[in-house]
Amino acid sequence: MLTPEQIQEKVRTIIQLPALPSIAMEVVEMVDNPKTSASKLGRVISSDQALTAKVLKIANSPFYGFPKKISTIDFAIIVLGFDALKEIVISISLISSLQKKSDAYFDAEAFWDHSLSAGVIARRLARDLGYRVSGEAFVGGLLHDMGVSILHRYFHSEFKRIVDIARETDLTFLEAEESVLGVTHADIGGWLAERWNLPDHLIEAITLHHTPTKAERNADLVALIHCADVFSGRIEGHAVEFDKGLDFDQEALERLHLDDPQLLSEYISNYAAAVKADMEQVNPLVTPKLS
């Protein structure tokens, strides 16, 4: 059996593990630098024609709701803002890196539906609750379970054992992961996020999305991602096997002022239709083709 340290080292050293494209790294660093100008950011993104085309396609989607056609990156930056551009670039760059086809132990379509719904729910929660992290909430929701994909691809025999245990016993998927690996997909996703040099608060949100009370850097973002994950499982059609036994953390609900059961139920009910509409708009733009 691999130790947690050996698993962490394997995640960090897998040669085939895709790296975050250099242009995406540069965009993330520029957006986080208050001295960056819109024109300089535009020049960097425009240097990659394929990325430019995808960014403009997403920027013009109903998901962002801008009524006038956005025809240039500079205009996209002006109307959408730096944070939305970072959200789009990270999403485009990382989604294809995690593409994996289905088998008896991993439903790729369900995985991406869940990931995308968690992203759009986190984005809606951030906006509706007045948290100024809506862009990173979308990215955090989208990538929160990427450790599951890494487990399936690079630790396949262990992944099969985990799934079998979760299916045949009363253990949750997280408990099954702990019993086989000594770590969870959240830990592995966090290590991968570190390898990609994602911002520290996104690493924290991915690592702690099942244990939000441990957050120290940005507890609001972690609470949003955690609640979006559970919300997604409560909305018909988006529950996934690896969230078996998942429930809301009470402290996370309190942080978001969603600890009133009636209010929480209303949010889940109201989001069901809205999330479906959001996903129909953005799904063809960011989700990998699995055929």
Image (spheres, rainbow, N blue to C red):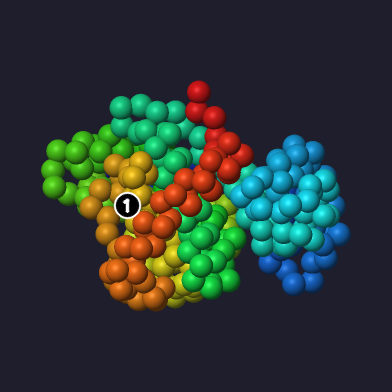
Say if 279 sits above or below 291 in the image: below
Instruction: Indicate whether 90 appears above or below 260.
Output: above
Determine if residue 12 is in view.
no
User: For this view, does 183 lie left or right of residue 144?
Assistant: left
Residue placed furthest toward the top: 291
Q: Tell me the residue that label 1 is attached to.
A: 234
| Rendered location of residue 162, percent (x, y) | 25, 41
Closer-to-camera residue (176/240): 240
Q: What is the crowding at mark 1: few (fewer than 14 residues within 10 Å), some, or many (at least 20)? A: some
For the point 75% across and 39% down, the residue is 53
Which amino acid does the dot numbered 1 rest on? Arg
Which residue is painted at 86% across and 59% down in the image? 39
Residue at left offset 14%, top offset 38% = 168
The quarter of the picture where residue 74 lies is bottom right
The residue depicted at 44 percent of the width and 49 percent of the height is 273
276 vs 96, nearest the viewer: 276
For label 1, the SS is: helix
Q: Is residue 38 above or below residue 48?
A: below
